[in-house]
Amino acid sequence: MTTTTPSWIADVTMEELERDPYPFYERLRAEAPLAYVPALGCWVASTKEMCRRIAGSDDSDFEGVIAPAGRRTFGDPAVLDANGAAHDDLRAMVDPGLQPSEVDRYVDGLARPIARRYLAEFENDGEADLVSQYCEPVSVRSLGDLMGLQSVSSDKLRAWFRKLSASFTNAGVDENGDWANPEGFTPGDEAKAEIRAVVDPLLDRWTEQPDDSALSHWLHDGMPPGQVRDREVIYPNVFVFLLGAMQEPGHAMASTIAGLFTRPDQLERVIDEPSLVRRAITEGVRWTSPIWSAVARRNHEDMTIDGIHLPAGSVVMMSYGSANHDEGDYPSPAAYDLDRTPVPNLAFGAGKHACAGTYFATEVVRIALEELFEAIPNLEPDTAHEVDFWGWGFRGPLELHAKWEV
């Protein structure tokens, strides 16, 4: 391991990271587990041990932040980069409805009818792109209905998360540290304007007539009688949810299916034994982590970590997708393997800024896969189409074509 940043790191491009980050991060893990990556304009932690060490650090050493492109996308205050009492307040706003005991109360009645509705649209066709026809629609509709956005079409919700994702991952900087592509934030700005136009009237209604939707609870929970939470506190976190929470169950679902497609024997076992679905999901999100590299921390003072000098104020991005391919914990990490020795992964983060919706997302994926495998037990990949994955911040298949005998 070197104690300086190897020169080859400067050659990586954003396009390479979007298309296939694995070779670059494999080399980082071996040679520079903590390194400054000029293309991203920040430091990167690439091993499981380094990600855990920094993500789990005390707030006095590292504070939670969003990488600059994320801050530009979400605004402030967002739960991802709030700290101390501000972080506790925001988590108290979003966490109650996502606790396992609460999720268990409503998730089956929420997600299962949605999954069945989308399945009914194509199960007699004998073929489908599961990403666009099932994984993403079930994902966005489940969270959209939970938030109280039943009036917003699934296609519009998908368009919003794609625009926000384009903005969030527009992280490239030039040699001066300026945005390499300032216009790359335009899609996110358009989405935020559309979201406000739709959600503002709903917040007006929920202010006077609260209901059981998540956004209504965000307005009222924890507030003194007669008061509601300021919308400028709510909106950055709406944008966070409409990006990460909206798309990541879909990515996790599609990646799990894609992984099983590489192991037909294991796919058959999961279809025959629904109790294996949870295990299949755990391996799916390790194999291709939906939140690949999107969470960061920033140090307060100069420090040295394993011989690397980290100046005060350095933004360190945790590459959880890389950590989940760490050879020390996962032999042959590039292979999907349902029978892999169970070792906890970092698919949904670590430390106090770990994903609040981990349990909800996993349960939506579980229900959707149970319904898919029951309705189409002879599902198989359509080999006329390749499976292309994309993304370094958030990652999943762009399309996933399947076929079956009707």
Image (cartoon, grey):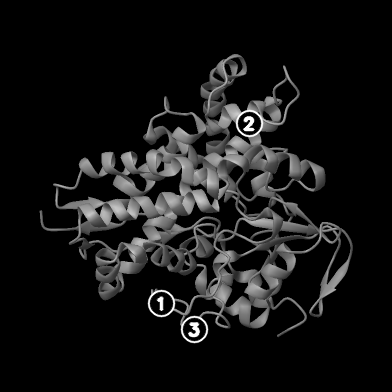
Residue 364: horizontal and vertical position, in percent?
42, 49
> Which residue is farthest left?
406
In this picture, residue 373 sits left or right of residue 183: left
Dot 3 crowding, Cα within 10 Å, few <14, some 14–19, many 20+: few
x and y percentages locating residue 401 in the rendered image: 26, 57
Q: Which x, y percent locates residue 55?
A: 71, 63
Task: Give the spatial CA distance, label 1 vs label 3.
Answer: 9 Å
In the visual, does 276 lie left or right of 296? left
Q: Residue at x 69, y 78 (%)?
A: 6
Q: What element does badge 1 sit on?
A: loop
Q: Nearer the viewer, residue 172 or 147?
A: 147
Residue of label 3? 331
Residue type at mark 1: give it.
Ala
| 1 or 2: mark nearer the eye | 2
Q: Judge left or right: residue 154 versus residue 290.
A: left
Asked whether residue 165 appears in the rendered view, the answer is no
How many circles with numbers are drawn on the protein?
3
Amino acid found under the numbered disc labelled 2 = Trp
Distance from Cα at disc 3 to Cα at disc 2 = 43 Å
Task: Give the number of the disc on residue 218.
Answer: 2
Dot 3 falls on a residue whose secondary structure is loop
Residue found 73% across the figure and 70% down from its top: 53
Splitting the image into 4 quarters, where does residue 222 fall? top right
Q: Nearer the viewer, residue 285 or 384?
A: 285
Quadrant containing the N terminus is: bottom right
Name the disc covering residue 335, or none: 1
**Amino acid on which the number 3 mark rests in the picture:** Pro
Residue 262 at what x, y percent from top left?
31, 72
> Which element is circle 2 on?
helix
